Image: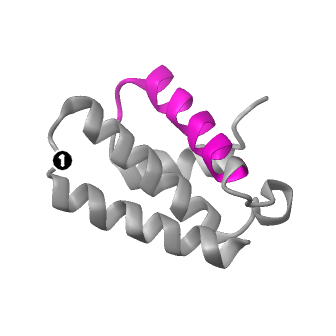
Amino acid sequence: MDIPADLKSFVNEYTRVDEDESVIDTLIFSAIEYLKNAGVEIEAHQESFLYKLAIGMLVTQWYEERKQNISTRDAAVMENGVQTIILQLK
C-alpha cells in the first residue's frame, strides 16, 4: 500500500519534519490503521480535509511522544481533537 502523494505532502507540511522519512511513513500507515480500527471508513474519507487533519494530528502526536518533548496536557488536547474528528467522520 502506497501513501497517496497529497496525504504525504500534507503530513510533511503539517508536522514540519524533513528528516526521518521512513519513521513518518510508518506513522502515517499507523494513523490510517488507527482510524480504520476506530470505525472510520477510509475509502469514503480519503479526500476529506478532516481525515487528513486527523492523520496529521496523530502523526505529530506520536512523533513528538517518540522524542518525549510533548507535555501530558498537550497530548490530552491532541487526543481529544482527534476523537472529535473521528466522531464526525463516522
Q: Say how many tags the image has.
A: 1
In this view, 50 is above or below 3? below
- The structure residue drawn at horizontal position 72% and vertical position 43%, both measured from the top left corner, is 4
- The structure residue drawn at horizontal position 43% and vertical position 56%, both measured from the top left corner, is 57
Looking at the picture, tell me which residue is in the foreground, 10 or 30. Answer: 30
Magenta: main secondary structure equals: helix
User: Which image quarter holds the C terminus?
Assistant: bottom right
In this view, 90 is above or below 18? below
Looking at the picture, tell me which residue is in the foreground, 18 or 86. Answer: 86
In the drawing, does residue 47 fall left or right of residue 50?
right
| Horizontal and vertical percent position of residue 33 | 67, 41
Q: Which residues are magenta?
A: 18-36
From this viewpoint, which residue is outermost toward the right? 43
Q: Identify residue for label 1.
A: 70
User: Which image quarter holds the N terminus?
Assistant: top right
Looking at the picture, tell me which residue is in the foreground, 72 or 6. Answer: 72
| Amino acid residing under circle 1 | Ile
In this view, 22 is above or below 1? above
- The structure residue drawn at horizontal position 34% and vertical position 37%, both measured from the top left corner, is 63
| Horizontal and vertical percent position of residue 66 | 28, 30
- The structure residue drawn at horizontal position 37% and vertical position 47%, both measured from the top left corner, is 60
From this viewpoint, which residue is outermost toward the bottom? 88
| Horizontal and vertical percent position of residue 16 | 33, 47
| Horizontal and vertical percent position of residue 12 | 45, 45
Q: Is 62 covered by the magenta stretch?
A: no
Secondary structure at badge 1 equals loop
Looking at the picture, tell me which residue is in the foreground, 17 or 29. Answer: 29
Q: Is 23 covered by the magenta stretch?
A: yes
* Mark 1: few/some/many CA within 10 Å (<14, 14-19, 20+): some
